[in-house]
Amino acid sequence: MNHSAKKFTLALPLLMLCILLAACSIAEPTEQLTTDVPEITPTIITITETQPEITPTISPPEDEESIEPLPLETSIEPVIAGLKGLPIDEFFDESYKQLLLREPETLTYAHLSQEFGLRDDQLDNISDAYLRQTQELEAAILDLLRTYDRDQLTPEQQLSYDIYEWDLDNRVRGHQFMYYDYPITHFIFSYDFALNELFTELHELNTRENAEDYVSRLSQVNRQVDQLLEGMKLREDAGAIAPNFIIGMAQSNLRGYLGMSGNNPDTINPRQLPVYSHFNAAIDEIPELSADQKSALRETALQEIEASFIPGYLKLVDYLNYLEPIATSDAGVWKFPNGAEYYAYKLRDETSTDLTPDEIHQLGLAEVDRIKGEMRQVFNDLGYPEDESFADSLGRAIREGGTYNISSQTGKDQYIAAVEAMIAEADQKMGDLFDIGPRWGVEVVPGPYGGYYTPGAPDGSRPGAYHVGIQGSSHNKFIQPTIACHEAIPGHHYQIATGQVLDVPMFRKEGGYNGFVEGWALYAERLAYEMGLYEDDPYGNIGRLQMELLRAVRLVTDTGIHSKGWTREEARTYMEEAMGPGFFTHEVERYVVIPAQATSYKIGMLKIIELRQRAIDTLGDQFDIKEFHNIVIGNGSLPLEILERLVDDYIANETDQ
């Protein structure tokens, strides 16, 4: 997503590829939504308002021959001047628009290019000079926002002010760490994964202009890779080099994508690359193109793939070959200069709380014990031996739950139909819990990768997509309903698609706070349980609890790696001890490359549960689950601090009545 993959984008990070995962729930299944929530005592969440003084460790490159920025804006001064003195509502939209205009790929994702009078023919400029200019603009917009008298604004404007200020302040806090991430990894947030998704999913191919824009973007890949390499060299200078085992996995992915044998570029067949095969098939469906025009576009696309796309990817392979022998096996960001401060920033960025690594670590350990106790009770209800090990009982439940055979096309089709039925069943129950919701549905999209959701276009022209993997021979059934509820309904799709059509400033529709977005999706899994979706499916309930356990284990493992200095092997050992041998230990590498992201799920879910219980305890019979959900998802994605304030205001208003 470059979106989520390129850390350089605004609206897309972690909103484009909201990754699979699980939530929470601890009571026996019931037909009705229970308001008697089983007792969970999450840590109370607050936000730190002060930022520690840290000496920046990254400075602009001294080499004057830096990559030439794309000619989108030569100076930000006219932009800043044009924003001064605007009425607050105009300022919200116009200032955010100016940030979006700097990211053409984000405009494509959000389906806003045409609205802004632009074509989808540019890749993002990710040169150091351009990114620093964007940082200047972000800081300037924050300063301008703070010139408005908040007390003179309407309540709705005050809410927008607070959200925008939190977002901009968070971006500015992160400027000093701009080169502390890993843009090329094995994971789906990697640059190459994101670029492929831009070309094969996000970039529409319905018109001749779309096709021409696609080819234009292909021609820019080599230049964008040069900009990326400029940034990777700055990361190297700053001491931010991925572990050697991550580099090796990333090399394998890049070579595999190119179809390259070893380091021999002569083995690459450009016609077999997804960026060409997708284009080749799609232009056949463009009615305005003649046969000659289609042939010419195909030929031009191949030329640009050979002249720009493949050379760019080969540069990445070469640079990783260079990095691997100088990289270490140290897994955590503690190894960076100011690594502890960076990790503290990332925890705040991902969870929108000021919880410390130690607090999150201890919370995770407590949740692991609680959830395993819940699972043991379900095992007992199924008649499993009480002295059987946790791993053996879980393995027994998985076997009894059965599998989907996806080794044939018929099996794949049956699996996809089963997932669609799960989503439809959940959707039928939404009227009991919500009086707001999406205007359009979600489609199940099969592919080589699965377990994530891609938001649709805000105007409904591109539906939301729940991606399911259909490689391999089988999928365990016990876990599938939980993933579907998390990614689709009532999880990511329900919340994100609802937010896209709210009558609020644009930044509240397009932005995303991971603690809220992933916290909601885990809370949604709990709702599925409370709605009775697992009443006749104890194995599905075990799958739900297993995924919740994974979320709790993540709190321990992520903080262990990045704060306590755990090695890759130590992290895997803990996961095996907590979950059983072979369960999700492959995720350790994910936690290594996107520090703190995995903590957002459980932290956000626990906060929503805490707020709901607070409302139930205070309001009693006056509590209305629909009104509570209106507050939570009816204001767009929110930092958890602001969500808590809104729920407290709702409770106070209901109490006064």
Image (spheres, rainbow, N blue to C red):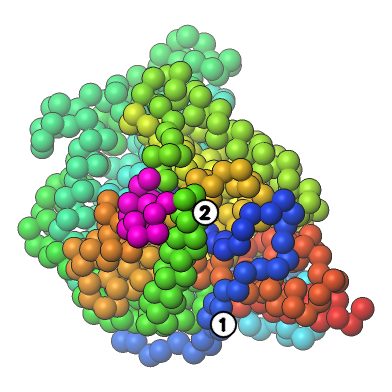
Q: Residues within 10 Å of mark 1 (few under 14, many from 20)?
A: few
* Residue 48 x/y as whole percent: 51, 86
Residue in the image at 52% along x and 11% along y? 290
Residue at image mark 1: 44
Residue 182 seen: no
Q: Residue furthest right?
A: 657
Q: Which part of the image, by quadrant, shows the C terminus?
A: bottom right
- The residue lying toward the viewer, choosing from 610 and 336, is 610
Point out the stretch of residues depicted in magenta. 384-396
* Residue 64 x/y as whole percent: 24, 65
* Residue 447 x/y as whole percent: 42, 32
Q: Residues within 10 Å of mark 2 (few under 14, many from 20)?
A: few
Residue 323 vertical position relative to residue 156 in the rendered view, above or below: above
The question of residue 387 being in magenta is answered with: yes
389 to the left or right of 509: left
- State the image quarter where residue 619 is shown: bottom right
607 to the left or right of 241: right
The secondary element bearing badge 1 is classed as loop
Residue 79 vertical position relative to residue 524 in the rendered view, above or below: below
Amino acid identity at mark 2: Asp
Residue 381 - label: 2
Estimate the spatial distance between the alpha carbons at disc 2 and disc 1, rounded to whole Å: 33 Å
The question of residue 232 being in magenta is answered with: no
- State the image quarter where residue 238 is shown: bottom left
617 to the left or right of 28: right
Amino acid identity at mark 1: Ile
Q: Nearer the viewer, mark 2 or mark 1?
A: 2
Residue in the image at 24% along x and 42% along y? 253
